[in-house]
Image (cartoon, rainbow, N blue to C red):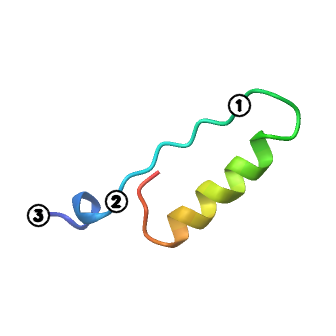
Amino acid sequence: MSEASNKPHALCIPYPSQGHINPMLKLAKLLHHKGFHI
């Protein structure tokens, strides 16, 4: 098995409203650094 298939997956979908996109991007980056495949 490849390393990528061993990573947990996460799907991040922000609510399309003011002030929701940047925090979701920060959360996605944090999850990615913790080993998630986004």
Identify residue type, mark 3.
Answer: Met
29, above or below 33, in the image: above
Instruction: Mark 1: give few (<14), some (14-19) or many (20+) Cα within 10 Å.
Output: few
Q: Nearer the viewer, mark 3 or mark 1?
A: 1
Say whether residue 37 is left or right of residue 26: left
Helix, strand or loop at mark 1: loop
Specify the label residue 8 is tagged with. Answer: 2
Q: Position of residue 8 (x, y in %)?
A: 34, 59
Could you give the CA–CA distance between mark 3 and mark 2, rounded to whole angstroms? 14 Å
N-term mark: 3 or 1: 3
Please give the residue where the numbered disc 3 appears in the rendered image: 1
Query: For the residues marked 3 and 1, what is the alpha-carbon distance in whole angstroms?
Result: 35 Å
Work out which residue is located at the far bottom of the displayed protein and give it. Answer: 34
* Lower sequence index among marks 3 and 2: 3
Q: Amino acid at mark 2?
A: Pro
What residue is drawn where x is 62% and y is 61%? 29
x and y, in percent, of residue 3 in the image: 24, 67
**Label 2: element kind:** loop
